[in-house]
């Protein structure tokens, strides 16, 4: 499966279990994950710091969909086009498009 096809299954605003997501990525694409993983404590702190609401009740390391997209675009497509956007959804979409354009 292409990386862009795999990424299209994720959501920009969702927080995912880091290990489950990494295992699925490797199984589906044959590649090693390249994104930063956050502790549950870090995720909770990030949500509070943003001040926009939301919650996280997990205890395992986690990742966010938009950060996965950005890491994949930067690492595999050598693209930083997502950096010109501010919203998580826009950044995710730009990163996904960069991977599609790179035929990844």
Image: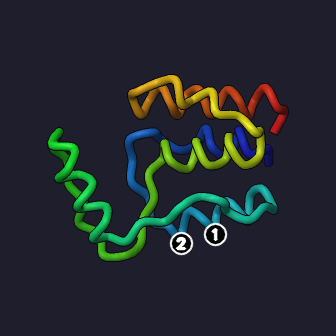
Q: Which mark is residue 5?
A: none
Q: Which residue is the site of mark 2?
A: 19
Q: Residue furthest bottom?
A: 59
Residue beneath the point at 61% across and 66% down: 22
Question: How many residues crowd mark 1 within 10 Å: few (<14), some (14–19), many (20+)?
Answer: some
Q: Are marks 2 and 1 in contact (CB under 8 Å)?
A: yes
Q: Quadrant of the C terminus?
A: top right
Q: Residue at x 72, y 49 (%)?
A: 75
Left or right: where 71 falls relative to 41: right
**Residue tagged 1:** 23
Colouring used for the render: rainbow
On the image, the x and y values in percent for residue 60 come to: 38, 75
Is residue 49 shown left or right of residue 38?
left
Secondary structure at numbered mark 2: helix
Residue 85 percent location from the top left of the image: 47, 24
Residue beneath the point at 79% across and 48% down: 1
> Which structural element holds mark 1?
helix
């Amino acid at each position: 499966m292409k990386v862009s096809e795999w990424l299209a299954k994720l959501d920009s605003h969702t927080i995912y279990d880091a290990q489950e997501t990494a295992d699925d990525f490797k199984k589906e694409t044959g590649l090693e994950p390249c994104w930063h993983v956050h502790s549950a404590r870090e995720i909770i702190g990030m949500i509070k710091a943003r001040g926009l609401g939301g919650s996280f009740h997990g205890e395992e390391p986690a990742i966010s969909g938009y950060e996965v997209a950005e890491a994949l675009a930067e690492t595999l497509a050598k693209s930083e086009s997502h950096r010109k956007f501010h919203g998580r959804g826009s950044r995710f979409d730009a990163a996904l498009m960069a991977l599609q354009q790179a035929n990844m």
